[in-house]
Image (spheres, helix red, strand yellow):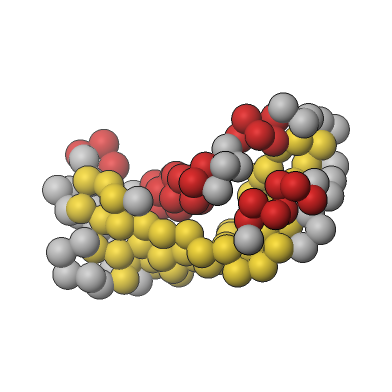
Amino acid sequence: MEKKIYYHDTDSGGVVYYANYLKYLEEARTEWLEDKGLGMKSFLDRGLLYAVRSCNVTYKRPARYGDVICCDAVLEKVTGAQLFFRQRVWDKDSGHDLVEAEVVLVCLGNNFKPRAIPDDLKEKLA
């Protein structure tokens, strides 16, 4: 995923506000899942949803107003109800890493309790 940094993404110092990287990471994961045919609708239609269970972010360098950044999502592991992603944000021009993250999603039922990911949806993750 590629994104241009606008003024509203930055803090008073002109660098991307740290919490905005969480949005970029989510957008990249969402794009990845949708590319696999696993958009939010495929979960909601079955009374399921996925939520972030844990997120470990390492900030390496700041992005600034006007920069173009790239963000990816790599699925490293799938368990009964969880998806483990490794993610990276980097500057498009320099290639420098800006952020690295490990994010775990959990599949939940309507009652917000963990549920097994249905086998046919798991197959799409391969």
Residue at horizontal 66%, vertical 68%? 77
Q: Nearer the viewer, residue 79 or 16?
A: 79
Residue at horizontal 17%, vertical 53%? 67
Q: Where is residue 89 shown, x and y percent of the image?
A: 36, 62
Residue 10 drawn above or below residue 75: above
Residue, far top: 45
* Residue 97 falls left or right of residue 120: left
Q: Where is residue 8 shown, x and y percent of the image?
A: 26, 36
* Residue 121 falls left or right of residue 95: right
The C terminus: image quadrant: bottom right
Residue at horizontal 41%, vertical 59%? 72
* Residue 7 falls left or right of residue 107: left
Tell me where residue 63 sits by quadrant. Answer: bottom left
Residue 53 visible? The answer is no
Q: Nearer the viewer, residue 110 or 98?
A: 110
Please give the count of numbered marks on the rendered protein.
0
Q: Where is residue 84 shown, x and y percent of the image?
A: 64, 63
* Residue 6 falls left or right of residue 102: left
Q: Nearer the viewer, residue 98 or 78?
A: 78
Residue 96 drawn above or below residue 80: below
Q: Where is residue 122 shown, x and y percent of the image?
A: 72, 53
Residue 41 drawn above or below residue 125: above
Residue at horizontal 64%, vertical 51%? 124
Residue 6 visible? The answer is yes
Q: Nearer the viewer, residue 60 or 27?
A: 27
